[in-house]
């Protein structure tokens, strides 16, 4: 549970949200207002199946697990046990009922389906933080990928673009 590949991907998404619902095979990391959503395919990361759980402070959990070399990680009810030969740490998960604001039904991916092209690119945490800062400056959280650049847009009530900031060419 929470293998190295999974932890690495989840760490890269802590700038999206500090909270997450971790479920197999598809986990959700989303901002509370759902303006930015990330799905993580744990099956593709060679993760073994486990019961779903909520985490309010994702980076705290990941840092605790990474602190120990070769720790055995198990979910026991509402507690994640992190065990080594010399240590046993317990991390209390957040009840899923309290995580509803961060939950996004993965069926949204089916609705998008073939109508929306898939875009993949690598982005560093620093670059993503820069996009979020630009978006906060123009009071927007709407991103568009256009001609290899990420465009931060501000829309009015009729969805007319009022302002935009284009990043450096990424792809």
Image: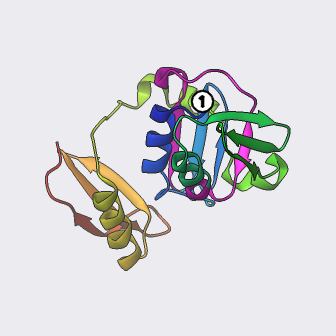
20 in relation to 48, above or below: below
Instruction: Look at the image and give the residue range highlighted in magenta.
Output: 36-60
Q: Nearer the viewer, residue 86 or 153?
A: 86
- Magenta stretch: includes residue 51: yes
98 vs 82: above or below: below
With 149 as the anchor, is 84 left or right in this view? right
Looking at the image, which residue is at 42% across and 28% down? Answer: 115
* 136 sits to left or right of 37: left
- Viewer can see residue 104: no
- For mark 1, give the secondary structure: strand
State the residue position of label 1. Answer: 26
Q: How many marks?
A: 1
Q: Viewed as shown, does residue 43 lie left or right of 133? A: right
**Position of the C terminus by quadrant:** top left
* Coloration mode: rainbow
**Residue sitting at 60 percent across and 54 percent down?**
58
Between 114 and 86, the residue placed more toward the observer is: 86
- The structure residue drawn at horizontal position 61% and vertical position 25%, both measured from the top left corner, is 25
Q: Position of residue 118 (x, y in %)?
A: 36, 30
In the image, residue 53 lies in the stretch drawn in magenta? yes
């Amino acid at each position: 549970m929470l293998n190295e590949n999974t932890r690495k991907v989840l760490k890269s998404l802590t700038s999206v949200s500090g909270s997450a619902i971790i479920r197999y095979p598809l986990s959700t990391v989303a901002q509370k207002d759902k303006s930015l959503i990330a799905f993580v395919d744990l099956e593709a990361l060679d993760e073994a199946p486990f019961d779903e759980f909520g985490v309010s402070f994702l980076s705290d959990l990941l840092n605790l697990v990474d602190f120990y070399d070769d720790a055995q990680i198990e979910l026991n009810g509402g507690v994640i046990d992190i065990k080594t030969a010399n240590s046993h740490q317990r991390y209390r998960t957040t009840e899923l009922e309290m995580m509803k604001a961060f939950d996004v039904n993965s069926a949204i991916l089916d609705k998008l389906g073939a109508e929306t092209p898939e875009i993949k690119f690598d982005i560093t945490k620093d670059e993503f933080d820069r996009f979020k800062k630009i978006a906060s400056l123009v009071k927007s959280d709407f991103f568009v990928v256009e001609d290899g650049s990420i465009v931060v847009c501000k829309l009015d009530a009729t969805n007319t673009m009022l302002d935009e900031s284009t990043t450096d060419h990424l792809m």
